[in-house]
Amino acid sequence: MKEKHLLPTDSRPLRALVLHIEGRDESPEQSEEYVEELVFLTRSAGYEVAGVQTYSWRRPDPATFLTPGRVAEIRSHLEAQKNLIDFVLVDADLSPVQVRNLENAWEKPVTDREGLILEIFARNARTAQAKTQVELARLQYELPRLAHRWTHLSRERGGIGLRGGGGEQQLETDRRKIRNQIARLRQKLKAFAQQAAVRRDRRDTLPRVALVGYTNVGKSTLLRLITKAPVLVADRFFATLDTTTRRVVLDGVPFLLSDTVGFIRKLPPTLLQAFHTTLAEVREADLLLLLVDISSPGYLEQLRT
């Protein structure tokens, strides 16, 4: 089976051709900002950007998402840049069938937006709870893609596919294993949630304030400035995945201040579901302090996010 994200033998970062798909009502200013965000996402995952192409979006093709003409156009570009591009990133949520067909057409690994964000979360997870939440989201993402992976394996071994043989039985075995893993991870997250609830009850005498906002907007920086605590601050998306809470006294008033995981446009639902325990800190807060970078051209849309 082909591995999408193994580093080349020279250990250099993988290089991506980034495809931005313009929305129907997307303005030129929005398109420019979305491209900048997508490039920053790619670099936050540890990859280099070999090039960016933007395409207008009308109606997704069920087989390849993009039109056949666009697929052929990109294939020609990839052939011309064969040794300079390692994989293709499509700024959309692709079905397993669409990923398979695009990989067959382009002869390159293909990653969609959800897959990229999952990689960033996996890179930045530090605590047991964060790692459990990321693993749950990853398995939920991988489950419907198992058949595609088995098709790749069968093709490379010269097999006849999944029908009527051991491959089909193994596919069902793998699905069952993943479902069991998902069930175990959900039980672990329930335990984390119970522990977090106990901690909140113990400190319930103090008001709780939660910092919320777009990813990389400066929540951790503000927490560090106010508390003087050694909080991780990094210029990359989703550097903070765990809730960090500190006791603060301002003008003689004590309260608890929490830094929370940031949001982003089109955040995958699997991650929202998996991070239910972490986001409980936001739901239980007495006050939400929303941080906004008004120097960003799209700050109003970030507010809506």
Image (tube, grey):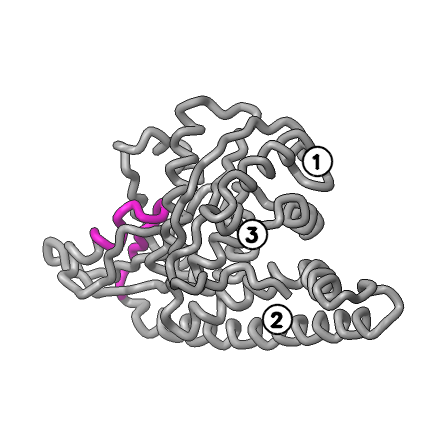
Which element is circle 1 on?
loop
Residue located beneath label 2 in the image: 182
Residue 269 — which label? 3
- Counting from the top left corner in percent of width and height, residue 220 is at 25, 55
Q: Which of marks 1 and 3 is in front?
A: 1
Under mark 3, the amino acid is: Pro
Task: Estimate how packed mark 2 is, as few (under 14), some (14 to 19) or many (20 or more) residues with alpha carbons within 10 Å.
Answer: many
Between marks 1 and 2, how big is the CA–CA gap?
A: 31 Å
- Residue closest to the eye, 46 or 291: 46
Q: In the rendered view, does 174 fall on the left or right side of 25? A: right
- Residue closest to the eye, 265 or 119: 119
Residue located beneath label 1 in the image: 61
Tell me the quadrant of the picture where the N terminus can be found: bottom right
Under mark 2, the amino acid is: Ile
- Counting from the top left corner in percent of width and height, residue 291 is at 29, 43
Between marks 3 and 2, how big is the CA–CA gap?
A: 16 Å
